[in-house]
Amino acid sequence: MNTKEQLLTWKSGTFSNKIKVYEDKNLIGSLDMSMMSKNSKMTLYNNEYCIKNKSIWNSDSMIIDRVTDEVIGEMAYTKLLGKAKITLEGKSYKWKTKDIFTTKWDLVDENELIYASYKSSLSSGKITITTPHPTLILIGLYSYIYMNQVSVLSTVGIA
């Protein structure tokens, strides 16, 4: 297990659906998602994934390896936002917020081992990685963006 922490940053435009992920100011990945789309594309360290929601209004999702087109995992969100259950390659993980404003959150395994911790502002943030796993890193970021989009839709009475 890697004990050295790794720091990544992410940025998006204020109303952009594309998030760029950086390591030492070098672009290493992206997350491209739309509020009204069932599909999102993710890349990190040349790994390519897709998240397919069962429908626009259903929060259950499949995680797909874009190279092999195989389903490698699933995600399900709680009705009261703030938590998600992730199954990836046969293992279970949780996404959970650390504050009521959803500006800090962790991605942990079933033993509460932290894989990554996240902090955000309006259109940027930091990811502290304790246990490297490219798919999980992006899923943690995806979950944050997804939760915020659902929150906005709920606020305006759409979701």
Image (tube, rainbow, N blue to C red):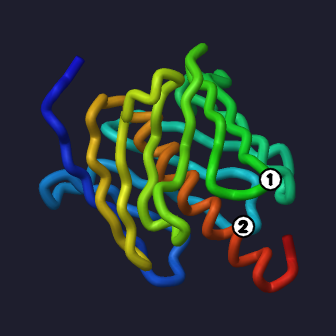
Task: Measure the C-alpha gap from mark 1 to mark 2.
Answer: 11 Å
Residue under the point 76% across and 76% down: 153
| Quadrant assignment for the C terminus | bottom right
Residue under the point 48% across and 27% down: 109
- Residue at the extreme top: 90
Image disc number at residue 150: 2
Considering depth in this image, is 141 or 44 the residue closer to the camera? Answer: 141
Considering depth in this image, is 92 or 69 the residue closer to the camera? Answer: 92
User: In the drawing, does residue 89 fall left or right of residue 62?
Assistant: left
Residue type at mark 1? Lys
| Quadrant assignment for the N terminus | top left
Pointer 1 and pointer 2: residues touching (CB < 8 Å)?
no
Q: Which residue is mark 1?
A: 79
**What is the x, y in percent for residue 35?**
69, 68
Q: Could you say which quadrant of the image residue 80 lies in?
A: bottom right
Considering depth in this image, is 30 or 84 the residue closer to the camera? Answer: 84
